[in-house]
Amino acid sequence: FDLSHVTASLTRALKFNIQRLEPTLTVEVTTQPPERMSGATNTVNLYLYHVAEDPHYRNLAGNLSDARPAQTKPMSLILYYILTTHHEGESGFETEIEQRLMGHALKTLHDFAVIDDETRIPGNGTEILHPDLRGRDNRLEVTLRPVSPEDALTFWSAEERQTARLSAYYE
């Protein structure tokens, strides 16, 4: 019932896998609205910005012998995230570092496209799925959304004072 457990699972995958990919890099993974990320260094940000019911599972029958069968069927949701990276050095934004972080983050979410009880970080065996989601037949499927450059600009146009950031959109 706590959507933050899904976000925590994804941020855990990002943090521990990026550290595995580049052990000398100290990376922070946050979940703030991207426009609030000022002064951040070596930061990957994964922000949940929208929730929708998964139409594929919407009409599945619950326990028909129950007075309220809708309450007994699994609730399947689609969570929409925006992934951004942030690094400000002494001379301002350092796009090369942001791009390197983005590459590591994209690789992580590609490699961990399915997260369940058995999913672990290679090498150290760190469990990814949040403890409150474990053992309950939960499965997270991570998909990079095909957002056009024009649609990405629309996302950022609400923040008139900012240029569009390097971003990836996930569900």
Image (cartoon, rainbow, N blue to C red):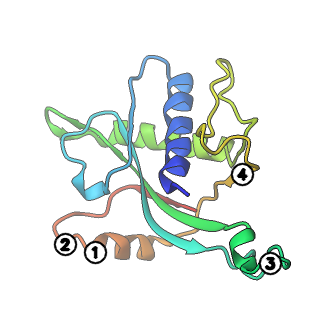
Foreground residue, 23 or 1? 1
The Cα–Cα distance between marks 2 and 3, rounded to whole angstroms, is: 43 Å
Q: Name the mark on residue 139.
A: 4
Tag 1 and tag 2, C-beta contact below 8 Å: yes
Image quarter in which the C terminus is found: bottom right
Is 44 on the left or on the right of 69, as rendered?
left
**Front label number (3 vs 1):** 3
Q: What residue type is labelled 2?
A: Glu
The x and y percentages for residue 118 are: 76, 35
Tag 4 and tag 1, C-beta contact below 8 Å: no
Tag 3 and tag 1, C-beta contact below 8 Å: no
Q: Disc 2 or 3, which lies upstream in sequence?
A: 3
For residue 126, what is the image quadrant?
Answer: top right
List the residue tagged with mark 3.
60
Is 18 on the left or on the right of 96, as rendered?
right
The Cα–Cα distance between marks 4 and 2, rounded to whole angstroms, is: 38 Å
Crowding near pointer 1: few (<14 within 10 Å), some, many (20+)?
few
Q: Disc 4 or 1, which lies upstream in sequence?
A: 4
Q: What residue type is labelled 4?
A: Arg
Crowding near pointer 2: few (<14 within 10 Å), some, many (20+)?
few
